[in-house]
Amino acid sequence: MFAIPLAWLQLKRETVRLLVALAGIGFAVILMFLQLGFQAALFESAVTLHQKLEGDIFLISPQSTSLTSMKSFPDRRLYQSLGFAGVDAISPIYLGLGIWKNPYWEGPPASQTRSILVIGMVPGDKVFALPEVAENQSQLRLTDVVLFDRASREEFGPISKKFEALKATGGLVKSEIESRRVKVGGLFSLGASFGADGNLITSDLNFRRIFSKRGEGMIDVGLIKLKPGVDLEKTLARFRQNLPGTSRTDPKKTTDQTKEDFVVGDVRVLSKKAFIAFEQNYWKESTAIGFIFTLGTAIGFVVGTVIVYQILYTDVTDHLAEYATLKAMGYKNRYLLSVVFQEAIILAVMGYIPGYILCLGLYNVTRSATALPISMTLDRGILVLCLAILMCVISGAVAVRKVQDADPADIF
């Protein structure tokens, strides 16, 4: 079967046709890579903050849908958790989207402001697994001082560069958030997401100064840290059974969903794993974004299949007389079919390589332009290669019917 590379000889005979086919397959490969890459970046960036939180159990409002659309609940619900055995420490977290003013904007005034995620915490609490936040605890205790995420999008201004330049002289970067003057007292690295283009961290008191309409004693996330060696599942079971409920609409303690994600009264209790899944499920199921990227991948697959089919069908038609001659010489349909499938696999692999290389560059450009964590992974590379081979094999399976119909008596 492989003694004579008939499939390769047929493909390279028409150089222009081969290059066009490889360009079409490469385009389909790039389209699939980009769609899958954007989808992965969406899900990864959506939970970057969750992954950096140093907690074992989290309390949120049952009405909350995502990190950028949190509903507040009374902080006393968090303090009630201190009565459970195994709880080591608690920390209230405040979240809000505020309007940040770019202090170095040189364009039209209308583009000077942008929405940014503001995170409030109690200074001294170990909330984030971010060394820079721990190093700047003293700055957080100061009035109207914030920490700025250096991985935020460029539209917020060259804050990190200006901060480093002014740091040597003792100066501070000054700006406005929600029309309140603030000073940047330090930097940290977290990263943008589809929900928030940038992040600020400040103290709980400064947060309430910025969002003056926030009610007293209302928080967005309750972080609970367990003592070393404490069993998480058993602690969650105790929360499920004994956490006081205060819901007026449903006075009974309600339990639903899973062992690591349930509602008791007016709070939702989640493990860290469930908290991450809660955010990802929102973007997967409650928005059109996940569907759009999946549809884009499917379109790339279909486009590639059609292109390869046209190439293979034309090639088979042009060589129909040769196929009929081989049949007359005694070659079986199985051999002729194998030649077409060999062509399909060769096209898939040759079209995949340039598509893969070009997509590495596109990932870098996208990462620089959007600050999203998009990068090539081994799993994605293998998945797209399999999809490329599959679309070429499907095309070959459709085009091969022409070979089966080749009758030497009709041809000659």
Image (tube, rainbow, N blue to C red):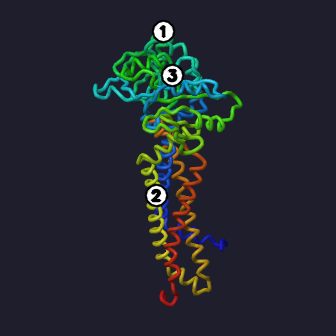
- Is residue 258 visible to us here? yes
The residue that label 3 is drawn on is 121
The residue that label 2 is drawn on is 298
Please tell me which of labels 3 and 2 falls first in the chain: 3
What residue do we see at 66% from left, 37% from top?
234
**For this rendering, which residue is in front, 108 or 53?**
53
Q: Secondary structure at mark 2?
A: helix
Specify whether 341 is left or right of 62. Answer: right
Amino acid carrying label 2: it is: Ala
In contact (CB < 8 Å): disc 2 and disc 1: no
Count neighbours of disc 1 (C-alpha within 10 A) and say few if under 14, some if 14 to 19, many if 20 or more.
few
- Is residue 271 visible to us here? no
Label ID, residue 349: none
Q: Position of residue 383 (x, y in %)?
A: 57, 54
Q: Position of residue 1 (x, y in %)?
A: 65, 74
Q: Is residue 8 above or below residue 244?
A: below
Q: Which residue is situated farthest in the right direction here? A: 229
Amino acid carrying label 3: it is: Met
Please tell me which of labels 2 and 1 falls first in the chain: 1
**For this rendering, which residue is in front, 405 or 370?**
370
